[in-house]
Structure formats: C-alpha cells, structure tokens
C-alpha cells in the first residue's frame, strides 16, 4: 500500500473557529481515509478550545524543532508552534497577538510544503484586522502565499459543486479596481483557472469572463470602456491559446442557473462580484484555492465567526472540502509529502 499524503492545516486566528475545526479534522474518518492531517498551531490553545467546545483533544503533539528536524509523521499530529500563550487568548476578541500567531503558523506550513514534507496547505480563517494590528504587510491568505512562495502570478478561485469563480482583483477598494485591470492580468486569471480546472475535472473547462460595468458597459455607455480595453482582448488571446472562454458577460445575468450550466467557472473582476453569489450558493461547502503557486494551498471559504468561536457550533464541512480539494490537486505533483 502506498503511504498516505500528509496534509498541513493551519490553525487560523486562535480567537476564531479555526482551532475547533482543526480538532475535528484530526479525528474525522473521511479525512483519515485520504491522508494524514498535520496541524500547525499551539497545543495549549487547542487544549483550551477542546475543553470549551466539548471536543476531544486528538493528535500527537510535537515541538516545532522536533518536527523540522525530522519532517516525518505517521499519525494525526499537532506541530506546536508556540507562537502565543494560551491564557492570553479570548474567544471572539480581536488582537495583534492572535494575528501574529496565525501568520507564524502559516509561515511554518509554507516552509514545510516548499521542502516537500507535506503535500499541501489547508488554511483555517484569518482575521484581517488582527493581521494588520500585528504589522503583517499582507491583507489576506492569497497575498501571503503569493509573496512567501515567490509566485510570479496567482489568483483566488472559489470552488463548489454549484459554482466556481476566480478573481482578477481581490482585497482592494472598488475605486482601485479599474487601475489594477490589464489585458495580461485578465489573461493570467483565465489561464490559471483553465489549468486548475483541467486538473480537477480531467477535461478542458468552459469559462466565462464578467464585465466590470452594468450591462458589461453597453459599448462604452457605462464606465470607461474597461470591457473593450481589458476583457475582450484577453478573451481573444485565450481563445487563440485553445481555451474555451466567452466574455465580457453581463454581470447581473452571469450567475443564473442557465449560465452556471453553460460554464464550469466564471472569471470575476473584483472581490464581491464573485463572492456574493458564491457565498449565497455554497457558504458551508465552498473551497478557496490559490492558483499559480509552486505549492498546493486551499482554504475554507468563510470567516473567523467570532460570534460562535470556541462553542463547538462551527460547521467543519468547508474545511473537509478544502482538504479533499488539496489532496486532489496534490496528486501527481512531484515531491508530495507522504507519511513515513
């Protein structure tokens, strides 16, 4: 029997629901049947969360130094990053310390994936204000992974059984979106989306690209011809590369049932253009995937849920879906981490 791949999970913001979701993954039969979960977190915090949420504390605990010296696991394991005193955390409370601890766990997981100790990284939710308070110079996971892995290009893709969307821009204000558009950026996202879906679906995908303005601009009637300047040329180039893609699509009609049956994914030009319909349709089951990285990275597609943190009420289904997606993306990649 081939050894199982080891999948790294990051604890996320300690004051949110990430720790309890990771605890559930350590004992979930459907996860254990596919791989070995390895949580980068703080054992003291996880013990506190387990007691507060009425969950079983599972997994062998190893120090960060011991893990980095060996890089080997055979069973569900917690790598104790010791980034924060457990007693300093309060559920649902924003703090710089929690932001820093979450970032530290991500750094360690990325390093493990880069050297091939794990097959990929699955992240629990961050809190952006906590990151900012900690002085972390990135607004979210996508930007962190892109910077720390040195990726030349990347994008965010949200995937579910009912809708898949990719974003040309992400964590920027609306006024900044037009300035961040270019033919090359739109083309990059189309290419990355096509490549990822081909791997996941094992067939060439059908893609659509949304316009920026109402009615996709009506040939310059609305906006400043962003569709003609950026979207249409990118679509033409992608078609020349053999990608099945259409656009610019009228955004308010792009997510109807008929259009969702027509396309395997929709490329969206800004954050909420894709996130709003996606979260309406797949809030509990969606997966966030960063495309274009030299490592595999997936995530839950929900926030820290401070209002229910440490109560055992958070649904783990998005995390389990993210683990399945990470393992699917990792298959066939060189140097994928396996249990020893």
Image: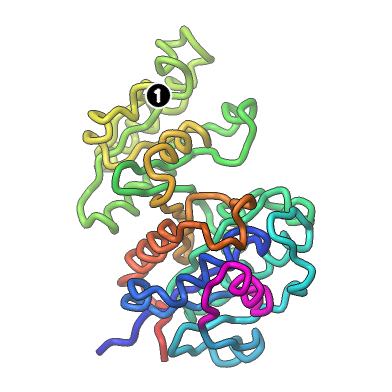
Residue extending furthest toward the top:
221
Q: Position of residue 28 (x, y in %)?
A: 40, 73
Q: Is residue 61 magenta?
A: no
Q: Quadrant of the C terminus?
A: bottom left
| Residue 335 showing in the rendered view | no
Figure quadrant of residue 238: top left
Q: Is residue 46 magenta?
A: yes
239 or 116, which lies in front? 116
Q: Residue at x 51, y 84 (%)?
A: 59
Figure quadrant of residue 250: top left
Q: Is residue 181 left or right of residue 296?
A: right
Q: Position of residue 48 (x, y in %)?
A: 66, 74
Q: Residues within 10 Å of mark 1 (few under 14, many from 20)?
A: many
Residue 47 vs 286, above or below: the answer is below
28 or 226, which lies in front? 28
Q: Quadrant of the N terminus?
A: bottom left
35 or 71, which lies in front? 35
Tag 1, which secondary structure?
helix
Identify the main secondary structure in magenta: helix
Q: Which residues are the magenta region? A: 41-58
Q: How is the image coloured?
A: rainbow
40 or 283, which lies in front? 283
Q: Position of residue 120 (x, y in %)?
A: 45, 70
Residue marked by disc 1: 251
Residue 324 vs 156, above or below: the answer is below
Q: Residue at x 39, y 41 (%)?
A: 165
Q: Is residue 10 left or right of residue 29?
A: right
């Amino acid at each position: 029997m081939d050894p199982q791949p080891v999948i790294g999970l990051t604890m996320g913001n300690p004051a949110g629901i990430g720790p309890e979701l990771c605890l559930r993954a350590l004992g979930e039969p459907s996860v254990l049947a596919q791989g070995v979960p390895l949580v980068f977190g703080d054992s003291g915090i996880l013990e506190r969360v387990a007691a507060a949420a009425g969950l079983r504390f599972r997994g062998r605990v190893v120090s960060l130094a011991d893990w980095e010296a060996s890089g080997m696991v055979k069973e569900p394991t917690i790598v104790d990053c010791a980034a924060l005193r457990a007693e300093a955390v309060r559920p649902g409370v924003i703090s710089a310390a929690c932001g820093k601890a979450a970032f530290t766990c991500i750094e360690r997981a990325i390093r493990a994936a880069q050297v091939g100790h794990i097959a990929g990284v699955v992240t629990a939710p961050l809190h952006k204000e906590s990151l900012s308070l900690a002085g972390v110079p990135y607004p979210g996971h996508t930007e962190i992974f892109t910077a720390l892995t040195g990726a030349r290009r990347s994008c965010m893709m949200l995937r579910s059984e009912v809708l898949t969307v990719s974003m040309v821009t992400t964590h920027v204000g609306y006024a900044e979106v037009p300035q961040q558009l270019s033919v090359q950026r739109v083309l990059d996202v189309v290419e990355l989306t096509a490549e990822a879906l081909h791997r996941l679906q094992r067939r060439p995908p059908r893609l659509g690209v949304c316009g920026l303005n109402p009615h996709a601009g009506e040939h310059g009637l609305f906006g400043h011809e962003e569709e003609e300047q950026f979207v249409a040329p990118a679509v033409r180039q992608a078609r020349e590369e053999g990608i099945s893609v259409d656009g610019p699509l009228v955004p308010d009609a792009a997510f109807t049932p008929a259009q969702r049956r027509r396309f395997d994914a929709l490329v969206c030009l800004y954050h909420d253009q894709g996130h709003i319909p996606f979260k309406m349709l797949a809030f509990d089951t969606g997966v966030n995937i960063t495309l274009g990285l030299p490592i595999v990275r997936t995530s839950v597609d929900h926030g820290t849920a401070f209002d229910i943190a440490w109560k055992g009420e958070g649904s783990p289904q998005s995390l389990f879906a993210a683990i399945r997606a990470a393992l699917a993306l990792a298959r066939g990649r060189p140097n994928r981490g396996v249990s020893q």
